[in-house]
Image (spheres, rainbow, N blue to C red):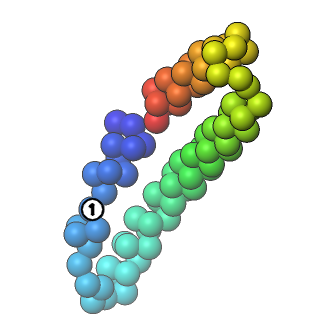
């Protein structure tokens, strides 16, 4: 399953109030097991966000309807499709 599916299926309800040190340790282990994956996903999303910020800046310098505008539009759509398939 994809990272998005995995995180969207996450439910805080699977955890109940902590009543023992063993239970606390299990929660901590669960968190630590998933945290690196979360950080990787967050880093990936930050890179995508930055990429789209750069594309937005490039759009501002183009004239709608121009050849350069159409090329940038096509490249942007390729980027959107690529990133949506990765996530």
Mark 1: few, some, or many residues within 10 Å (few <14, many ≥20)?
A: few
41 versus 82 height, above or below: below
Foreground of the two, 73 or 28: 73
80 versus 11 height, above or below: above
Farthest-out residue, top: 67
Check disc 1 and report the residue beneath it.
11
| Residue at the (54%, 21%) spot, across then down | 77
Tell me residue 23's x, y (percent).
32, 79
Picture quarter with the N terminus: top left
| Residue at the (71%, 23%) spot, across then down | 63
87 versus 69 height, above or below: below
Tally the numbered discs: 1
Tell me residue 48's x, y (percent).
61, 40
Inspect this view and state whether residue 72 appears: no
50 versus 38 height, above or below: above
| Residue at the (67%, 18%) spot, across then down | 69
Foreground of the two, 57 or 42: 57
In the shown orientation, is residue 1 left or right of residue 74? left
Farthest-out residue, right: 61
Q: Identify the secondary structure beneath mark 1.
A: loop
Inspect this view and state whether residue 3 appears: yes
Tell me residue 26's x, y (percent).
37, 72
Tell me residue 42's x, y (percent).
56, 52
In which quadrant of the rendered view does residue 78 lie? top right
| Residue at the (28%, 51%) spot, across then down | 9
In which quadrant of the rendered view does residue 21 lie? bottom left
In the shown orientation, is residue 9 left or right of residue 53? left
């Amino acid at each position: 399953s994809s990272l998005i599916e995995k995180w969207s299926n996450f439910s805080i309800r699977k955890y109940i109030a902590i009543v023992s040190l063993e239970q606390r340790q299990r929660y901590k282990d669960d968190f630590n097991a998933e945290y690196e994956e979360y950080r990787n996903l967050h880093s990936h999303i930050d890179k995508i966000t930055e990429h789209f910020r750069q594309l937005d800046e490039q759009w501002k310098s183009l004239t709608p309807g121009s050849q350069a505008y159409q090329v940038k539009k096509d490249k942007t759509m390729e980027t959107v499709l690529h990133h949506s398939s990765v996530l």
